Image: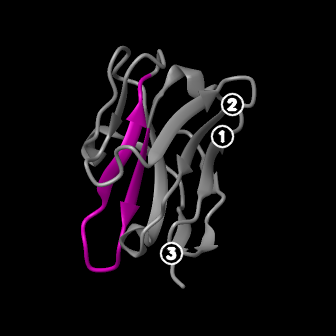
Amino acid sequence: QLELVESGGGLVQPGGSLTLSCTTSGSSLANYGVGWFRQVPGQEREGVSCVSRTDGNRWYSDSVKGRFTIFRDNVKNTVYLKMHSLKPEDTAVYFCAAESSSVLYCSPYRLEYDNWGQGTQVTVSS
């Protein structure tokens, strides 16, 4: 079981940017597909973006496509989610998750992931 730790959340004005980080110790994230999900109270956790184990496949939800970028730094054992042009509707707790069953593709579905972080709050407000 991986212990994932997210960081980088905070309060930002509409139109601003944030970069979230997801890291772990003791294991290499390069051996896992990694996804970012978000959740608003009272709603289901939704997929935002994911990157495959090989780094050759990335997926973005329609709501963030063109504004968010997911990328790996295997030297730092970290997966980042760079978020630009943030909107109030991006406000949520953001979670990273990891799964080891896929190699070439990543999954946007939360049930495919069996390792989760505790989440980091992102608030977009003026």
Mark in front: 3 vs 1: 3
* Residue that numbered label 1 is attached to: 24
Q: Closer to the N terminus: mark 1 or mark 2?
A: 1
Where is residue 31? Give x, y as percent: 53, 20
* Residue sticking out furthest to the bottom: 126
Where is residue 125? Give x, y as percent: 51, 82
User: Gap in Å between the C-alphas at discs 2 and 3?
Assistant: 28 Å
In the image, residue 122 above or below residue 72: below
Q: Quadrant of residue 6?
A: bottom right
Q: Closer to the N terminus: mark 2 or mark 3?
A: 2
Q: Closer to the N terminus: mark 3 or mark 1?
A: 1
Where is residue 32? Give x, y as percent: 48, 26
Q: Which amino acid is tagged 2?
A: Asn
Q: Which residues are magenta?
A: 35-52
Number of the label disc, if any, that sits on residue 124: 3
Q: Main secondary structure of the magenta part?
A: strand
Q: Quadrant of residue 28?
A: top right
- Look at the numbered disc 2 and give the secondary structure of its residue: loop
Number of the label disc, if any, that sits on residue 15: none
Residue depicted at x 31% and y 50%: 47
Residue depicted at x 41% and y 75%: 88
- Look at the numbered disc 3 and give the secondary structure of its residue: strand
How would you rate the neighbour count of disc 1 (Cα within 10 Å): few for under 14, some for 14-19, many for 20 or more? Answer: some
1 and 2 marks in contact (CB < 8 Å) = yes
Residue depicted at x 66% and y 57%: 7
Number of the label disc, if any, that sits on residue 77: 2
Residue 90 is one of the magenta-drawn residues: no
Mark in front: 2 vs 3: 3
In the image, residue 118 above or below residue 112: below
User: Gap in Å between the C-alphas at discs 1 and 2?
Assistant: 7 Å
Residue depicted at x 29% and y 55%: 63
Where is residue 10? Give x, y as percent: 63, 71
